[in-house]
Amino acid sequence: MTCILLFTFTRLDNIPRSTPLMHALILCAGLIAIRAFVRLRETEITIQVNQAHAAVENVIMIGSTELTFWSLKIFSAYCPGQWQVVGLLDGRVENVGRSVSGFKIVGLPDHLQPIIDEFAEHGVTVHRVVIGGDEDLLPQDTLREVQRVCNQREIPLDFVPSLFNLNVIKGSVKSTSAAVTSSPTLLPSYFKWKYTIDFVVSGIILLFYAPILSIAAGFAVLDVGWPIVFWQHRLGLGGRKFTIWKIRTLRPPFDQSGQPIPEKERQSWVGTFLRRMRLDEFPQLVNVLVGDMSLVGPRPLLPRDQPDNPSLRLTVRPGITGWAQVNGGTLLSPGEKDALDEWYLRNASFWLDLRIMLMTLRVVFQGQRRSSGSEPSVDARNIAYLRAETSD
């Protein structure tokens, strides 16, 4: 970099061509010397640690899995020098003799007994055998052979998940995704090519409205503060979780001293305006581009807000706006929203999507109101009709 800078301003006039080469050699020699010094220092520290922990436990690891190497790093950080991996066994014949992450694969799990005998011949006693996974990591015959050898030699046999109590964590994890069962209802063929329209239109909107989005984000930073965006995990196509983005419109729930801020004080005029004009929803156009959402469709719900049978609504991509949003939105009950969304899914078309987008502009400028026209609305008779149609 020094040579490039000098050449830019002086073209290296009157400087021998050997000077940059000597410069590079000096730098390389210095780097090598520093690395050698650091390696020597680390070796001295390792020797001191080993002397402080004279009772080193020799371990044979079985299975060259990622869990194996992460566990070795954890033990090295927690109790340095107390565990010494003398050999690594792997079930793939082609890996024998290779080194993985600095550990040499010395044989197959089926060869555990002769390998232990070989180490004993050289004065190395194996104190423990650890399998880098659950019991299903090895074939049943191989696992029984390993257990037999360990029992015969009175060598403890451990599994990495058991050492770190990972089985308890794995058993306690419960899926929050809604179960998606196959629905006999056939959706309109429009959904097969709907994403192409969504991709093109959302890209055009982002291209032309990027300045407005930048201005809205700037005002949000000035009035609401950092971070600019607010995110949540929602359920989308097939019950898969995805991250939905919005411009943040509420101030933080706590002040700098950690005291809670009243809900009314968290609301700002900028945030209220952004919500009123739906500008806080603009970042979701990125969700449309990557295929997580659609421009028009059922609004994505939190896992805890899913209806009793979410199968139908989770067979399509959720939308930024939808039939329920332009027929009442927050003025509707969850049951009414679900019924209107189901009606849309059975009657979706390009012209219906275009109508919903135009009605969304009306909602932006006139506010939300419950539909009372001849189209499927939110009165009791229409809800009953929609429910009956859903059960057919």
Image (spheres, rainbow, N blue to C red):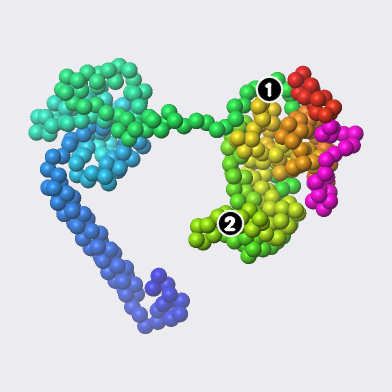
Image coordinates of residue 367 in percent, x first then y, are 81, 49
> Is residue 362 in the magenta section?
yes
Tag 2 residue: 261
Q: Quadrant of residue 30?
A: bottom left
Between circles 2 and 1, the one closer to the viewer is 2
Residue at image coords 69%, 31%: 313
Residue nearer the viewer, 53 or 65? 53
Compared to 207, does 193 lie above or below? above
Compared to 100, does 281 lie above or below? below
Image coordinates of residue 7 in percent, x first then y, are 43, 76
For the record, the magenta segment spans: 359-379
Residue at image coords 14%, 44%: 53
Q: Report the amino acid beneath label 2.
A: Ile
Element under label 2? Answer: loop
Q: Report the amino acid beneath label 1.
A: Ser
> Is residue 371 in the magenta section?
yes
Tag 1 residue: 183
Q: Quadrant of the N terminus?
A: bottom left
Task: Choose the circle earlier in sequence order: 2 or 1.
Answer: 1
The answer to whether residue 114 of the structure is visible from this angle is: no
